[in-house]
Amino acid sequence: MLETNTLLSLEHTIAKDYLSGFEFPWQALAGIKDEILRLIETLDKEEYTELSPGVWAHKSATVFPSAYIGAPCIIGKDTQVRQCAFIRGSALIGEGCVIGNSVEVKNAIIFDGAQVPHFNYVGDSILGFKSHMGAGAVTSNVKQDKTPIVIKNQFKNIETGLKKFGAILGDHVEIGCNSVLNPGTVIGRNSRIYPLSSVRGCIGENIIYKGNGKVVKMR
């Protein structure tokens, strides 16, 4: 379930061609900035407007004046960037997304329809189509000892070589309020994480994670 095409519906991001070149999605994290800069050159300037140097938003997007948006960044059609959002840069945000009040985003690809609406942190991560993070849910993208991040699943440990890697959320994943996704977390499509969970490693698709490693398969 860890492969890019298994976790993510690539037709729901303008980074489709970029992501399809990687067997695993975390391999794309290091090149997000360069990919956004490349995509900016391909945007239809009749549909997008440059809010500040290197920051482009679709003309249908709603960006509140109190939001800070660092370059490079692309904000898609009908997306909302709400009050006091802090987009630090290297953020590719799709269509129909919500970046909510006091949400911080950096070095991330956010697929169409994904929502991070309240007090979230999304760093060095990829959020799949129509995924949703409840209020206060965050990604933790650096280990306390600052060593490279290892993805742990039931079959083997995968060395990523990355010192910064938050989480990969598959399509339609739901993260409960005030949950923490520890470095190197990968969650399969359609899975749900209970509120107040601390998640580490790989969670399969169509799983309900109830906390403390307890999981059940959806019916």
Image (cartoon, rainbow, N blue to C red):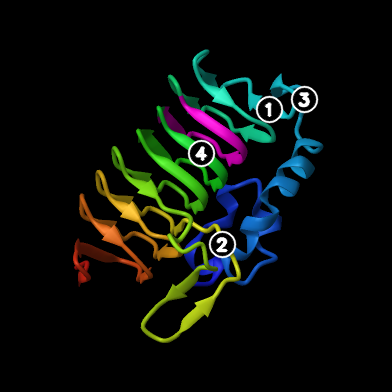
Around disc 1, counting alpha carbons within 10 Å, would you say few (fewer than 14), some (14 to 19), or many (20 or more)? many
For marks 3 and 4, give the one nearer the viewer.
Answer: 4
Q: Which mark is residue 163?
A: 2
Residue 92 is a magenta residue: yes
| Quadrant of residue 44 within the rendered picture | top right
Nearer to us of marks 1 and 3 is: 1
Up/down of 53 relative to 128, above or below:
above
Separation of disc 1 and disc 2 at Cα?
A: 29 Å
The answer to the question of whether label 2 and label 4 lie on touching residues, with beta carbons closer than 8 A, is no
Residue 154 in the image: state x and y as whole percent.
36, 83
Disc number placed over residue 78 in the picture, else none: none
Tell me the magenta residue range: 85-100
Q: Dot 3: what SS?
A: loop
- The circle on residue 56 is 1
Residue at figure coordinates x 34%, y 59% from the top left? 190
Whether residue 74 is visible = yes
Residue 136 point in image, percent of width and height: 30, 39
Residue type for callout 2: Lys
Q: Is residue 73 left or right of residue 209?
A: right
Mark 3 or mark 4, which has the lower sequence index?
Answer: 3
Amino acid type of the residue tagged 3 in the rendering? Lys
Q: Main secondary structure of the magenta part?
A: strand
Of 96 and 138, the residue lying toward us? 138
Q: Residue at x 37, y 46 (%)?
A: 138
In three-dimensional space, the C-alpha distance between marks 2 and 3, rounded to whole angstroms, equals: 36 Å
Q: Residue 10 at x, y = what percent?
A: 58, 56
